[in-house]
Image (tube, helix red, strand yellow):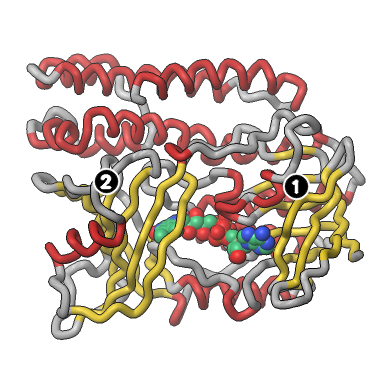
Amino acid sequence: MVETEILIVGGGPAGIISAITAAKQGREVILVDSKSYQEIGNKVCGDALNLEPIKFLERNLGIPHPTGNEVADFVERAIFKSHNVSFPLSGDGYVLNRHPYGQRLLKMAEGLGVEIKDNTKVISALYDDFSVRGAVVVEKGGEGILSEIHAKITIDCSGRNFIIRKTLPERLFPFLEKHLEKRDIAATYREIISLKNQDHPYHNELYLIYDETIPEPGYFWIFSKGEKQLNVGIGWYMDRKSDRGMKELFREVLNKYYPEGTYEVLDKGGGQIPTRYPLTNAIVPGFLTAGDAALHVNPFTAEGHGPALIAGYYAGEIASKAIEIDKYHSEEFLWQYNNKIMNHFGLSHTKIQLFSEALKKIKVSGLEFLIRRSILSKDQFINIHSGKKLGLFEMVKIAIKAFPRYDILLTIARVSKSTQKFEKIFSNYPNDPENYPTWKNDFDIEMNKFRDTYE
Ligand SMILES: Cc1cc2nc3c(=O)[nH]c(=O)nc-3n(C[C@H](O)[C@H](O)[C@H](O)COP(=O)(O)OP(=O)(O)OC[C@H]3O[C@@H](n4cnc5c(N)ncnc54)[C@H](O)[C@@H]3O)c2cc1C
């Protein structure tokens, strides 16, 4: 049995930043990952990362921006593209080479004194009647002998696996959600390709391509990885059906841009991304969770790297303070983490979810109709997509122009109205756990009502 102050499960962006933050506060930290040391930080991904979280890390932890071989390309804009329309969304940032960037952060954590236990798989949470106490682990390639790591605080950053949260009993921790529905997970497949005889025209841009063959609102992406290389992928919600397999459909769409034989595949793989509004509670005594494990991914674009970095920082910060003042089993103290997440992106991700659900209903053809007929301006589209509300005057103008597609108009009006309701609900987000059950009830009623409309 091993003991530590903070146990972090997972060395992805959320876990590594939690570790760096806590170590900088002088805390004793163990980070476990089932991957080997050399593989930590490597993940099948679209590799896009916007500037905001990078600046956040620089401001709060002094971590320099990605540089050298960590950067595959700089991004100036993201482009929404469907069969008939194409227009830019905001999107300064990077296309990364995630592996070297992740390795730099890993080495930084290690340099700050974090103990890295690689090839170590967490099997389940350790807990008593009141609190999480650590984890049960097994060494990969060993003899299958289970051992325990005891910790004052355990931070679950195990991504899609959410291994600690999922193994905590509902009976003891009723306000920590345990299940993830199919409609809240995107299945994805991507390849890194190198073009044989040509450069590509995608420098500094991220293309999100809404192709009619992909179950809506799934998309195909083309991201530049330098002069000849591209990161190309496909993804859609797991409750959406396609008559073809994901790889088959991927190849079919890619063929429209680059026929087979014109490129070499350098890397390939798939993965699942939780794409729902964040957990509205991500703590119990002795426990916090961050990143994909806490559903921190943007529910429309499926960007989760940035939110994981930000949430990792908050988790490390609150866990460290809790230990410093001996409040690591205090739900009241740890609750501050929920407040930070809800303030930073809880509301905006929830509003983006509404937009994403509405898109399932009006479909890309409906969105094209709005844009081609100039019913929605680019700014209004961005406002709805990022969860800002439309004023009454704007709605009336849109209504007049939308004739005869009032079904679409009704959907926009519903999104706009629900957006405002959620703004109100989030403005009442409790500052302590005591008032959470009532708040959560109000939240669930509104969210279920909205989602049921679009089932
Ligand atoms: C195909 C694809 C494309 C994507 N494209 C983008 C994109 O372009 N931009 C973007 O921002 N996001 C993208 N994402 C999402 C992004 O990759 C994640 O949101 C991000 O990596 C989340 O970080 P995390 O630290 O929460 O989890 P992860 O990065 O998943 O890290 C979890 C870590 O936990 C470890 N682990 C898991 N289970 C256990 C266990 N039982 N015991 C020990 N260790 C364990 C894993 O080995 C891993 O190292 C994409 C995801 C996929 C799958």
Q: Residues within 10 Å of mark 1 (few under 14, many from 20)?
A: many
Amino acid at dot 2: Ser
Of helix, strand and loop, which one carries label 1? helix
Q: CA distance from mark 1 to mark 2?
A: 43 Å
Left or right side of 411 for 428: right
Query: In the image, what residue occupies the spot 34% across and 32% down?
Result: 355
Q: Is residue 193 above or below residue 380?
A: below
The location of residue 49, given as percent across then percent down, is 43, 60
SS class, disc 2:
loop
Sooner in the amino-acid sequence: mark 1 or mark 2: 2
Q: Nearer the viewer, residue 93 or 164?
A: 164
- Above/below status of 146 relative to 362: below
Residue 55 seen by the camera: no
Rendered view: 267 above or below 175: below
| Residue positioned 19% across, 18% down in the render | 407
Q: Quadrant of the N terminus?
A: bottom right
Q: Which residue is mark 1?
A: 318
Q: Residues within 10 Å of mark 2 (few under 14, many from 20)?
A: some
Q: Quadrant of residue 72?
A: bottom left
List x then y, in percent, for residue 453.
36, 19
Residue at (78, 62) in percent of width and height: 137
Q: Is residue 75 visible?
A: yes
Q: Quick check: marks 1 and 2 in contact, CB under 8 Å?
A: no
Name the residue tied to disc 2: 242
Q: Which mark is residue 359?
A: none
Occupied quadrant, residue 61: bottom right
State the count of labels: 2
